[in-house]
């Protein structure tokens, strides 16, 4: 049985807490460039179709009713629900264009609606979006797919969850962040316990197979005690998963974060104390650490996939589907097709113009070379399984690991001395003290990182 425990070592965390990527992809999205466009994307689709296999679809719904001051997502703040109509009309056209390019027999194993707030849409709009998707892609009808949606409990009514289940969703993630009234006011997200738990219970009643709660630590006015109270209330409801993110306060990059009072921000020491409390409470409650802010019950499919060596990571986080090419739909969405990543335009005007011209809205991307794919495989093993088996990499890429990565293995030696990992002739094994610092270990194998300014990334802890 795989050891999925973690060890909180304050000294190690303080010494290794530096800025770095979250590795939802390798190379990271910062490497995408505008030299990659429609022609290059179509070439990758042809390569993808030749290889075959299932698909994953991501839909970006950018609209929100109100702004949360901490948010760094690409969103459009409006109370006018009619603003979604022209966007959806363009999205339907993009679905048709993309669907025509992919082989019609490729099954969609994974589907995700994110944002923004997908439940900003009315039921009729959501129903139409799913119907159009089914017209152009082969969705599953037996509920065996991983079809998930991000939900704002403030944007649901008594029938919303039932309707989402009827549309085919079977996994749900609820945004919360914190129950404390002072924290909620400071970040402009007022959300009651009743709203949250009503949605959570409805999801269970309707047969959603996985429920996730999103929390953020490091928000203004948070303390260990106040966040512990929020966590205790959620633990009493026992969701299947927790996503507990470190808030990255970067007001120079994200305008909405400038509305947060810097004087209200918890110190680095308080954030570490909160993180330690979170780890202790969740593991005591029986949850296992999946990695990168994610905890799950031992019988959750993510925990099982990790123990079986089948866990994967993509732009939406951890996944059980490692074999899917990911198609991004809607503004700012990122996909992974063939040997490339691609991203759609970020502005509504650009999106509307390209769609009206029957052009794919891809405006930048990145084609991986053999070294990129090799390093991606290494980082994926580390970040998903806390183990790196040299033989598996050598057999897939026809290299001698010790020779190819001699410099990187030398860089891991101090981490071995610090008790973060062990290095043997067979591979690298991440110890419980190193799992919270897994981003640091992945960074050793990132050839692009030295070229980047550290301020472009959040702290690892």
Image: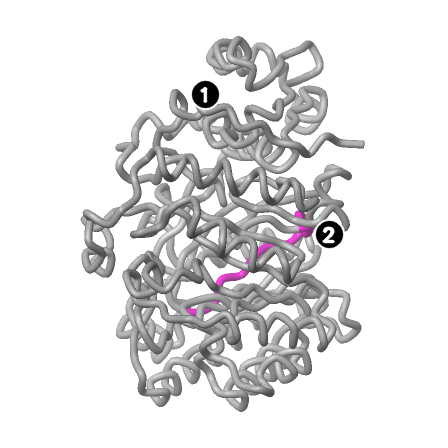
What element does badge 1 sit on? helix
| Residue 199 quadrant | bottom right
From the viewer's perspective, tell me whether residue 35 is left or right of residue 112.
left
Query: Which residue is at 30% across, 28% downward?
Result: 451
Query: Which residue is at 58% across, 27% downward?
Result: 7
From the viewer's perspective, tell me whether residue 168 is left or right of residue 361.
right
Q: Viewer-proximal residue, 38 or 383?
A: 383
Q: Viewer-proximal residue, 37 or 461?
A: 461
Query: Which residue is at 45% across, 72% downward?
Result: 192
Q: Quadrant of the C terminus?
A: top left
Task: Locate residue 27, reporting x and y percent.
Answer: 45, 38
Residues rendered magenta in the picture: 320-330
Q: Is residue 379 above or below residue 65?
A: above
Query: Which residue is at 69% across, 10% downward?
Result: 425
From the viewer's perspective, tell me whether residue 176 is left or right of residue 32.
right
Q: Residue 180, labelled with which disc?
A: none
- Circles 1 and 2, Cβ within 8 Å, touching? The answer is no
Residue that carries the numbered disc 1 in the rendered image: 12
Magenta stretch: residue 223 in it?
no
Find the distance from the CA under tag 1 to the CA under tag 2: 31 Å
Q: Viewer-proximal residue, 442 or 451?
A: 442
Colour scheme in use = one colour
Residue that carries the numbered disc 2 in the rendered image: 301
Q: Quadrant of the N terminus?
A: top right
What element does badge 2 sit on? helix
Magenta stretch: residue 329 in it?
yes
Task: Locate residue 201, reporting x and y percent.
Answer: 65, 73
């Amino acid at each position: 049985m795989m050891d999925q425990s973690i060890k909180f070592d304050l000294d190690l965390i303080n010494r290794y807490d530096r800025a770095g990527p979250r590795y939802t992809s390798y190379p990271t999205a910062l490497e995408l460039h505008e030299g990659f466009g429609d022609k290059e994307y179509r070439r990758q689709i042809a390569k993808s179709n030749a290889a075959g296999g299932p698909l994953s679809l991501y839909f970006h719904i950018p609209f929100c009713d109100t702004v949360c001051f901490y948010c760094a997502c690409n969103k459009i703040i409006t109370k006018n629900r009619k603003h979604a109509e022209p966007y959806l009309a363009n999205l339907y056209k993009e679905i048709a264009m993309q669907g025509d390019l992919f082989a019609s027999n490729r099954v969609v194993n994974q589907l995700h609606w994110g944002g923004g707030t997908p439940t900003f849409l009315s039921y009729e709009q959501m129903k139409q979006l799913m119907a159009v998707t089914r017209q152009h892609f082969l969705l599953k009808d037996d509920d065996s797919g991983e079809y998930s949606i991000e939900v704002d409990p403030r944007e649901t009514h008594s029938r919303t969850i039932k309707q989402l289940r009827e549309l085919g969703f079977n996994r749900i993630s609820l945004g919360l962040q914190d129950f404390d009234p002072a924290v909620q006011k400071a970040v402009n997200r007022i959300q009651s316990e009743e709203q949250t738990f009503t949605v959570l219970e409805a999801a269970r009643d309707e047969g959603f197979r996985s429920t996730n709660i999103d929390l953020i630590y490091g928000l203004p006015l948070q303390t260990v005690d106040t966040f512990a109270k929020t966590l205790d209330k959620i633990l009493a409801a026992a969701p299947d998963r927790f996503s507990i993110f470190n808030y990255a306060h970067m007001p120079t990059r994200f305008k909405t974060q400038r509305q947060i009072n810097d004087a209200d921000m918890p110190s680095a020491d308080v954030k570490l104390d909160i993180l330690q409390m979170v780890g202790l409470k969740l593991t005591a409650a029986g949850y296992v650490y999946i990695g990168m802010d994610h905890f799950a019950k031992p019988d959750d499919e993510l925990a099982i996939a990790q123990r079986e060596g089948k866990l994967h990571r993509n732009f939406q986080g951890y996944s059980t589907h490692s074999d899917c090419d990911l198609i991004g739909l809607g503004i700012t969405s990122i996909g992974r097709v063939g040997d490339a990543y691609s991203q759609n335009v970020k502005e509504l005007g650009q999106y509307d113009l390209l769609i009206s011209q029957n052009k794919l809205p891809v405006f930048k991307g990145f084609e991986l070379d053999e070294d990129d794919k090799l390093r991606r495989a290494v980082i994926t093993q580390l970040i998903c399984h806390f183990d790196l088996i040299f033989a598996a990499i050598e057999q897939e890429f026809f290299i001698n690991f010790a020779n190819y990565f001699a410099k990187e293995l030398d860089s891991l030696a101090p981490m071995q001395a610090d008790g973060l990992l062990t290095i043997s002739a067979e591979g690298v094994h991440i110890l419980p003290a190193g799992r919270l610092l897994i981003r640091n270990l992945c960074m050793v194998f990132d050839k692009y990182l030295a070229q980047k300014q550290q301020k472009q990334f959040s702290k690892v802890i």
